[in-house]
Image (cartoon, rainbow, N blue to C red):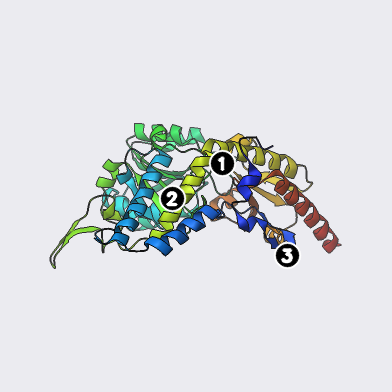
Amino acid sequence: MARRTYDIEAIRRDFPILAREVNGHPLVYLDNAATSQRPVQVMAQITRFYRDSNANIHRGVHTLSQEATELYEGVREQVRAFINAPSAREVIFTRNTTESINFVAHAWGRKHLRAGDEVVLSEIEHHSNIVPWQLLRDERGIVLRFIPMLDDGTLDLVAARVLITERTRLLSVTQMSNALGTIVPVKELAALAHARGALVLVDGAQSVPHLPVDVQDLGIDLLAFSAHKMLGPTGVGVLWGRMAVLESMQPFLGGGDMILTVSLERSTWNDIPHRFEAGTPNIGGVVGFGAALNYLSRLGMAAVREHEIELVDYALRRLGDIPGVTLFGPPDARQRGGVVSFDLQDVHPHDLGQVLDGEGIAIRAGHHCAQPVMQRLGLTATARASFYLYNRASEVDALVRGVESATRFFEHARG
């Protein structure tokens, strides 16, 4: 499966955790949609920052502060290049994707949305792209519309053309479902939304780590994603927005570094992006994220994507051959990211997850913060195996053996 230009064993050597044992078995880490592992390069960069350059950023005149500021702002430029944004000033650091979406709901939504305005989402969204809009609906009286999910896990684009109208002020949609792996045709939906005068926010928590994302090519207005799903530390997120959109927003949080002047009567705001980064940020985390971006850029996101397509195609075929296994999501690996959700007949996903953990295999079991998807499938939970750039075909084989072993175990338990 591996190509000569994609040395999976060399990659795996950069991730020491993959060499450990769990419950007496080699670790098979298939929970990457929840969080990825970190390479030694990221850990070394974080250690180097705290060892050599730790200081608070911006406005400090001493050497350490200037070094820390240069490192932090350098990552802003790396993010710009990674997603092909027009300007680094359009890159705002947050804690995670969830905060980035809430940022938009508060800073843009509260200023621009009025009772009766419509926000269009989809039925395959993560809760982080549903709950903030429900809160705003309850506060402002906006109307939420949902693009339906078809039986194969894709979106009903015919319905989307009806739902997105001149009353739509925002389309907020995932580019890749964390529960099903479905890749959404964001570019097509963005063109449709813009033709109706709406802005477009994309939840890129799953897509940015796994496939090439070019915000200018997609024609979107806002993009949210997290560092920890793409080899970086936890506690670092990104909100990218077109400058004209960011300029129309009010500050989300108030405090230090986001101000220009403060008096007892009034305050004025700093320039963008600093206007939206109140307080001391996760400086070391952002610096570590820079090393993660370097790692991904050296591999090439196109190569990462092709590797995952091969893995997912193999996993769909192998798991699909197991009696009692039902697969969910698009059948074509090129229509989905590195996620395979499935159900084993008469076995609760949590029970399956525990049995697999006993063999060192880490998957996710539950509703995956996507309860509307589970309701649409008529389930309470699924088992989810999610792959990344360091996974290999032999780990798919281990998963298959584990599921087959679990099948025999529960059949015996039932007598």
Quadrant including the C terminus: bottom right
Task: Residue at 52% x, 38% y: name it.
Answer: 300
2 or 3: tag closer to the N-terminus: 3
Q: Secondary structure at mark 1?
A: loop
Q: Which mark is residue 182?
A: 1
The spot of residue 372 in percent (x, y) is 54, 51
Task: Give the CA distance from mark 1 to mark 3.
Answer: 33 Å
The residue type indicated by label 3 comes to: Asn
Q: Nearer the viewer, mark 1 or mark 3?
A: 3
The residue wearing badge 2 is 290
Q: How many marks?
A: 3
Q: Is residue 276 visible?
A: yes
Find the distance from the CA under tag 1 to the CA under tag 2: 28 Å
The residue lying toward the viewer, choosing from 274 and 352, is: 274
Locate the N terminus and report the quarter of the image it occupies. Answer: top right
Q: Position of residue 21 (x, y in %)?
A: 70, 61
Q: Residue furthest bottom?
A: 264
Q: Using the image, tell me which numbered label, if any, was put on residue 241.
A: none
Indicate which label's residue lies in the foreground, 1 or 2.
2
First along the sequence among labels 1 and 3: 3
**In the rendered image, which residue does mark 3 sit on?**
23
The kind of residue on which mark 2 rests is Gly
* Residue at horizontal 57 percent and vertical 40 percent from the top: 304
Secondary element under disc 2, as helix, strand or loop, is: helix
